[in-house]
Image: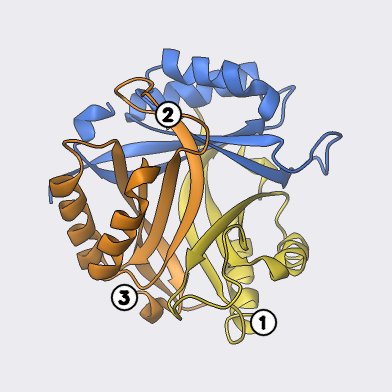
Chain colours: A yellow, B blue, C orange
Amino acid sequence: MDTTQVKLVTIIAESVLEHRLVNDIRRLGAKGFTRSEVSGEGSRGRRVGDVEGANIRLECLVSEATAERILEELAERYFENYAVVAFVENVAVVRGDKYI
Amino acid sequence: MDTTQVKLVTIIAESVLEHRLVNDIRRLGAKGFTRSEVSGEGSRGRRVGDVEGANIRLECLVSEATAERILEELAERYFENYAVVAFVENVAVVRGDKYI
Amino acid sequence: MDTTQVKLVTIIAESVLEHRLVNDIRRLGAKGFTRSEVSGEGSRGRRVGDVEGANIRLECLVSEATAERILEELAERYFENYAVVAFVENVAVVRGDKYI
């Protein structure tokens, strides 16, 4: 099977940021994304309003350059004032040209 | 801790494919799987009927050979006509013999 | 973008274990975690009570040493008698000092 290495970017954030984050990752080059509802407790301890389903998880498959841009922009725009976690993994996909 | 490297295969697909995909991955060698409901927007843009919860995410821990077979079969059977994303990652597990 | 390699630990378990597992990973050094509801079928076949939403998935970003301790403790305490899957991946994060 002929696979391509791409980056899986996972973002976990307060639900209130969902539309802004989706716009950001689209603008920065993500061709698609997957969204799910999660809950959790961050390194600041339990936040007010941190109830079940109040966080979202966005995932997108992108090129290394796009992953880099997404991390940079999230760090600049949100990390100071919002509960946002973002991490990047290497994954192998079929038909990688769809994503990069 | 003695861990084994196995493959984590993640499949994100239209919910209508769930039972077929579960049968496929079982037949191809997955010993188990995890299922969750997700939503999203793919590289084709928003699809008719693409509403919250309408996509499923299946994950299974398998050997490299099984991961290869799953990717091949998904590519052959679904990629042309369905919204299906599949990717493979390296993960470390305890008691890896359960999965391979 | 300056990133740090950390470990993403994913635990999938029977819902009944949720509070014990959360206490375990906190005690062992996880600064936060993400929780979602999943369902699935394990290597023992479909279990009694294995209905939609009956399993939970916990994820945490931790140092390599903490990941090791979490796997060891889970293996000792739960693997014998409970349906628990745990795996570890390498991920890159921004501001990795938050997690380790």
- In the depicted view, which residue is nearer to us: B46 or C49? C49
Give residue B96's quadrant in the image: top left
SS for tag 2? loop
Which residue type does callout 1 highlight? Arg
* Dot in front, 2 or 1: 2
Q: Indicate left or right for B81 with B18 as reference.
A: right
SS for tag 1? helix
Residue A62 visible to an observer of this rendering: no
For disc 2, the marked residue is: C50
Q: Are marks 3 and 2 in contact (CB under 8 Å)?
A: no
Q: Answer yes or no: are tags 1 and 3 on the same subunit.
A: no
Q: Indicate left or right for A68 with A33 as reference.
A: left
- Label 2 to label 1: alpha-carbon separation: 42 Å
x then y, percent, for residue C36:
50, 51
x then y, percent, for residue A6:
54, 49
Identify the residue shown where x is 76% and y is 69%: A20
| A69 versus C11 height, above or below | below
Mark 1 belongs to which subunit?
A
Which mark is on residue C100?
3
For disc 1, the marked residue is: A77
SS for tag 3? loop
Mark 1, other Cα within 10 Å: few <14 / some 14–19 / many ≥20: few
Identify the residue shown where x is 61% and y is 80%: A82
Residue B86 visible to an observer of this rendering: yes
Which residue type does callout 3 highlight? Ile
Mark 2, other Cα within 10 Å: few <14 / some 14–19 / many ≥20: some
Which mark is on residue A64?
none
Mark 3, other Cα within 10 Å: few <14 / some 14–19 / many ≥20: some
Mark 3 belongs to which subunit?
C
Which residue type does callout 2 highlight? Asp
- Label 3 to label 2: alpha-carbon separation: 35 Å
